[in-house]
Image (tube, rainbow, N blue to C red):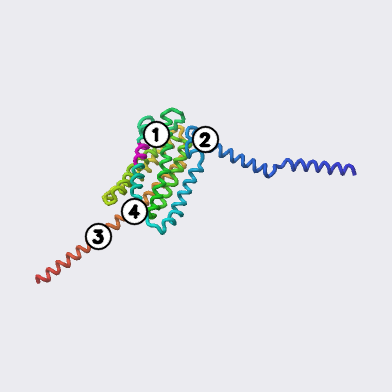
C-alpha cells in the first residue's frame, strides 16, 4: 500500500514539473510580441541611416501612411460628397502661387542634384551612398529629404481637382503616381539618401519644372491656354524619364559599388509600370483626339467636294 502511495506521489510530482515546463499563454504571447518588437526596431531603427532617421516624418512610417490614407479618403469619398451640391471653386490665385512655388522647388532640386552630385563627384555607371557627415554627403541627404517633402506637397494637385470638380482628371495613373512616390522617397530618405537612386529624382525634377510651368501659365492666362501647344510633349518627356531611369538602374546588374542590387526588385517593375501607364494615357488622350480630328477633317473635305461638285453641275445646267 505504501509503495502505491509513493508511486502516485512520484507521478504527481512529475506531472506538476511537466506542467510547469510548458510556457504559459501570456508568456508565449510576450515572447511573440518581443520578437515582433525587436524585428520592428531592427528594420525601422537599426537599418536606418543615423543621419536622417530622426528628421521630421522620417522616424516612423505611421505619419506618412496616415497622410496617404487621409489623402485617398478625401479624394475617393469625402471630397466628392462634399462638393456634390456645391459650385466648383475657381482657386485661380491659389493655383498661380502653388504652381510657381512648385517650379522654384523643382528647379532647386534639379540644381542641387547636378551641383552636389551628378556633375561633380558621382559616377554615371554606379554610385554608392556616402553615409559620412561631410558637408557634401549631408547636402545630398538634405536634397533627398526635400524631394520627399515635395512629393507630399504634390498631393495638393489632386485636392485641387476635387475642389474644382474636375474628377475626370483623377485617373488611376494619377492616384497611383501620387501615392507611390511619397512612399518610395520616404524609404530612400530613411535608408539610402544619396548614391545611384538619386538620378531618378534629378530627371524627375527637371520634368516637373516643365510641367508646373505649363500649369502656371494655364492658371495665369486661361484665355491663352489653347495656345500652349506643348502640353502633350510633357507626357512624352515623362515617358522618356522612365526609359532613362530603367537603363540607368540596370547598370547595377553589371557594376558593383555597394549600392543594394535588391533595390532593382522594386525599381524596375515600378518604372515599367509607370511607363506603360503614361503610354496608355498618351494614346487615349492625344492619339484618339488626333484620329477624331482627322475623321472630322476628312468629312469636312468630303462635304466640301460634294458641294463643289453640285455647284459645278448647277452651273453647267444653267449654261445648257
Q: Position of residue 269 (x, y in %)?
A: 44, 45
Residue at x 25%, y 62% (from the top left corner):
299
Rendered image quadrant of residue 199: top left
Q: Residue furthest right?
A: 1
Residue marked by disc 2: 47
Q: Which residues are magenta?
A: 103-110
Left/right placement of residue 193 relative to residue 4 reads left
Residue marked by disc 3: 298
Residue marked by disc 4: 285
Dot label at residue 125 = 1
Q: Is residue 108 one of those drawn in magenta?
A: yes
Which label sits in the foreground, 3 or 2? 2
Q: In this figure, what is the number of numbered marks?
A: 4
The mark nearer the N terminus, 4 or 2, is 2
Looking at the rendering, in which quadrant would you find the N terminus? top right
The mark nearer the N terminus, 4 or 1, is 1
Q: Position of residue 305 (x, y in %)?
A: 19, 63
Image marks 3 and 4: residues in contact by CB distance under 8 Å: no
Which label sits in the foreground, 2 or 1? 2
Which label sits in the foreground, 4 or 1? 4
C-alpha span from label 2 to label 1: 25 Å
Amino acid at each position: 500500500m505504501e509503495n502505491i502511495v509513493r508511486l502516485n506521489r512520484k507521478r504527481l510530482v512529475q506531472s506538476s514539473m511537466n506542467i510547469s515546463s510548458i510556457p504559459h499563454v501570456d508568456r508565449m504571447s510576450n515572447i511573440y510580441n518581443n520578437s515582433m518588437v525587436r524585428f520592428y526596431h531592427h528594420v525601422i531603427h537599426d537599418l536606418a541611416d543615423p543621419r536622417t532617421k530622426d528628421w521630421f516624418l522620417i522616424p516612423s512610417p505611421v505619419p506618412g501612411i496616415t497622410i496617404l490614407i487621409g489623402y485617398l479618403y478625401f479624394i475617393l469619398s469625402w471630397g466628392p460628397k462634399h462638393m456634390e451640391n456645391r459650385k466648383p471653386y475657381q482657386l485661380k490665385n491659389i493655383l498661380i502661387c502653388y504652381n510657381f512655388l512648385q517650379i522654384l522647388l523643382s528647379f532647386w532640386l534639379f540644381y542641387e542634384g547636378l551641383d552636389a552630385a551628378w556633375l561633380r563627384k558621382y559616377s554615371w555607371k554606379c554610385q554608392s551612398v556616402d553615409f559620412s557627415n561631410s558637408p557634401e554627403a549631408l547636402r545630398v541627404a538634405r536634397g533627398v529629404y526635400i524631394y520627399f517633402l515635395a512629393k507630399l506637397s504634390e498631393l495638393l494637385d489632386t485636392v485641387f481637382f476635387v475642389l474644382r470638380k474636375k474628377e475626370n482628371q483623377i485617373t488611376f495613373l494619377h492616384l497611383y503616381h501620387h501615392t507611390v512616390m511619397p512612399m518610395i522617397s520616404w524609404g530612400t530618405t530613411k535608408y539610402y539618401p544619396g548614391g545611384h537612386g538619386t538620378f531618378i529624382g534629378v530627371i524627375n525634377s527637371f520634368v516637373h519644372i516643365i510641367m508646373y510651368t505649363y500649369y502656371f501659365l494655364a492658371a495665369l492666362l486661361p484665355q491663352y491656354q489653347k495656345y500652349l501647344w506643348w502640353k502633350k510633349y510633357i507626357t512624352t518627356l515623362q515617358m522618356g524619364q522612365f526609359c532613362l531611369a530603367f537603363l540607368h538602374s540596370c547598370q547595377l546588374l553589371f557594376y558593383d559599388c555597394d549600392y543594394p542590387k535588391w533595390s532593382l526588385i522594386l525599381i524596375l517593375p515600378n518604372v515599367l509600370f509607370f511607363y506603360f501607364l503614361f503610354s496608355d494615357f498618351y494614346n487615349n488622350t492625344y492619339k484618339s483626339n488626333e484620329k477624331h480630328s482627322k475623321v472630322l477633317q476628312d468629312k469636312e473635305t468630303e462635304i466640301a467636294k460634294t458641294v463643289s461638285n453640285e455647284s459645278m453641275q448647277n452651273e453647267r445646267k444653267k449654261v445648257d
